[in-house]
Image (spheres, rainbow, N blue to C red):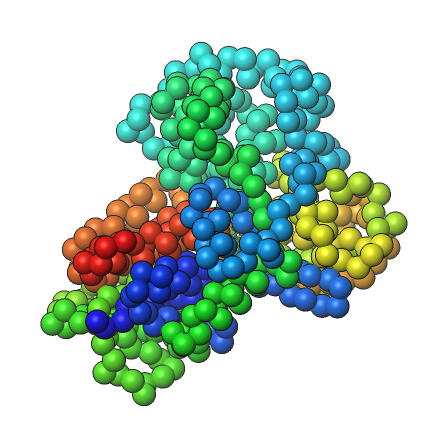
């Protein structure tokens, strides 16, 4: 049988190629860059281990653990320390622990008494009609009030999407939240009843899902996938077009024109939306236009990884990190306490902090120079965490189109890709612009795409 072509060697494309291999289906993976891994970028510099892109994988599906096991990486996986359950939110420029129990919620100075009292009304607020597509800001304000939007949801959204609650669709970006209202009529009741149901079924909520990385960071996963698939991977290949003729696919590479006649039984597109939109697709002499996908907005982000002497940081750094609500008017979106989360990220007596800046909140900041961006982040860290002195380690990475925004109306893009899969034999889509933005979502997306390909090629999974 002809192999399957996979375009895009981020975690989605790699997972799909690995799963296909397990199913006995050969594939060739084309990657434009000179390395696979996409936005995952771990940097080892002496005793510092910096994640420039994503930091942690949330184990929300058993398929994620299966991948780690099948790669033989279980011994190298590191779950985050218990203290990572503690998260801080900044209010009046000071970090406050996000309450973890009803009693802590009653006592926390993070929310006013008025906001807490307002929450009691939540179970009595009517659910929105199911056909209405509401933005997250309006949903949260309607159900739990403005203060929770400003000091809980806004920073949380910055942490996941680097986006704006006013644009994001509750149904598309936070489907579980949408389902809680639709199913139980209340987020509070839904939390209680949903938790009971989950316990009965042995499931795990996103909030309680274990978080992990590896001894040498997320690059460990990429290197292992790269090693296992090395004979199937072609890096430095920018694919500009795909064509199906008489049921067989050909792939056009801008950078390697030496193998124009190679044929594939199918093509999996595991690309960012703005690259999908540029691709020339022809199916049996008919052009298929993907340009509408260029309307999917991406938030720009720069990550700043900084090392400091422990004695120069006043805060205990006893948690996952601190998120900065927009109303606090700080420069950065938030900071992960990387060396508290996983061991071996900084030399003895030092700490490592990873901050993010930009997002839809302040896209202009991502156009500044690395030194200017570092200075802005350090200015924030001095105020929030009591950082003194100069950093012992500095690294800035830019992602001008980092994270796709699942805004109101996003469903039409997903529907478009799903319809094309159904209508165009042998064409498949997967990845962060279709099935969810987290690494866990992308692993599941790659895995499931491989399953659909196998079914399509009549191979039993
Ligand atoms: C700064 C940052 C921090 C994040 N933090 C987290 C986190 O802590 N936890 C989490 O769960 N998620 C996080 N995410 C989200 C998550 O990392 C991404 O959604 C996920 O890695 C996307 O994987 P992907 O394979 O779908 O896409 P990508 O990683 O974008 O891979 C796509 C690949 O396609 C290649 N390509 C593009 N065009 C072509 C072409 N024409 N031909 C061939 N190849 C092409 C690209 O070079 C790239 O390698 C973060 C994202 C960013 C940017």
Please tell me how many numbered marks the rendered image carries. Answer: 0
Front residue of 410 and 225: 225
Image position, residue 72 (x, y; %): 51, 59
Place residue 430 in its image quadrant. Answer: bottom left
Specify whether 317 is left or right of 389: left
Specify whether 322 is left or right of 211: right
Place residue 3 in its image quadrant. Answer: bottom left
Q: State the residue at coordinates (31%, 43%).
A: 411
Image position, residue 428 (x, y; %): 27, 58
Specify whether 316 is left or right of 281: right
Front residue of 184 and 172: 184
Front residue of 288 and 449: 449
Image position, residue 24 (x, y; %): 30, 65
Image position, residue 368 (x, y; %): 63, 62
Quarter containing the N terminus: bottom left
Q: Is residue 115 above or below residue 254?
A: above
Q: State the residue at coordinates (36%, 22%).
A: 183
Residue 280 visible in the picture: no
Q: Is residue 166 above or below residue 221?
A: above
Q: State the residue at coordinates (54%, 58%).
A: 73
Residue 286 visible in the picture: yes
- The single residue placed furthest to the bottom in the displayed view is 258
């Amino acid at each position: 049988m002809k192999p399957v072509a996979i375009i895009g060697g981020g975690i989605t494309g790699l997972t799909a190629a690995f799963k296909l291999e397990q199913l006995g289906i050969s594939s060739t993976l084309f990657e434009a860059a000179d390395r696979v891994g996409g936005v995952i970028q771990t940097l080892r510099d002496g005793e510092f281990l910096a994640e420039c892109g994503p930091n942690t994988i949330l184990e929300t599906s058993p398929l994620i653990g299966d991948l780690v096991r099948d790669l033989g990486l279980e011994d190298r996986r590191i779950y985050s320390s218990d203290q990572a359950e503690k998260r801080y939110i900044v209010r009046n420029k000071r970090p406050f622990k996000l309450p973890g129990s009803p009693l802590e919620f009653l006592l926390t100075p993070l929310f006013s008494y008025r906001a807490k009292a307002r929450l009691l009304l939540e179970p009595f607020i009517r659910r929105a009609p199911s056909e209405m597509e509401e933005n997250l800001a309006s949903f949260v304000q309607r159900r739990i009030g403005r203060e929770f939007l400003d000091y809980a949801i806004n920073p949380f959204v910055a942490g996941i999407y680097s986006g704006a609650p006013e644009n994001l669709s509750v149904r598309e970006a936070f489907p579980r939240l949408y389902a809680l209202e639709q199913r139980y009529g209340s987020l509070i009741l839904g939390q209680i009843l949903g938790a009971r149901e989950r316990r009965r079924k042995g499931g795990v909520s996103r909030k309680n899902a274990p978080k992990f990385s590896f001894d040498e960071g997320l690059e460990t996963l990429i290197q292992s996938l790269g090693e296992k698939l090395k004979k199937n991977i072609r890096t430095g290949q920018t694919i500009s077009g795909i064509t199906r003729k008489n049921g067989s696919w050909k792939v056009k590479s801008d950078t390697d024109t030496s193998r124009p006649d190679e044929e594939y039984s199918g093509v999996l597109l595991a690309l960012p939306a703005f690259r999908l939109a540029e691709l020339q697709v022809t199916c049996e002499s008919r052009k298929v236009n993907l340009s509408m996908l260029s309307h999917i907005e991406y938030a720009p982000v720069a990550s700043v990884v900084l090392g400091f002497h422990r004695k120069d940081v006043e805060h205990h750094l006893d948690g996952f990190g601190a998120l900065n609500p927009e109303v606090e008017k700080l420069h950065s979106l938030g900071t992960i306490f990387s060396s508290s989360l996983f061991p071996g990220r900084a030399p003895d007596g030092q700490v490592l902090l990873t901050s993010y800046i930009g997002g839809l909140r302040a896209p202009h900041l991502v156009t500044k120079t690395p030194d200017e961006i570092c200075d802005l982040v350090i200015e924030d860290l001095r105020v929030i965490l009591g950082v003194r002195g100069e950093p012992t380690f500095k690294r800035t990475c830019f992602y001008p189109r980092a994270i796709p925004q699942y805004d109101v109306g996003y469903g039409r893009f997903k529907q478009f890709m799903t319809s094309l899969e159904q209508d165009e034999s042998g064409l498949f889509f997967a990845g962060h612009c279709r099935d969810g933005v987290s690494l866990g979502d992308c692993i599941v997306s790659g895995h499931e795409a491989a399953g659909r390909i196998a079914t399509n090629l009549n191979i039993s999974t």
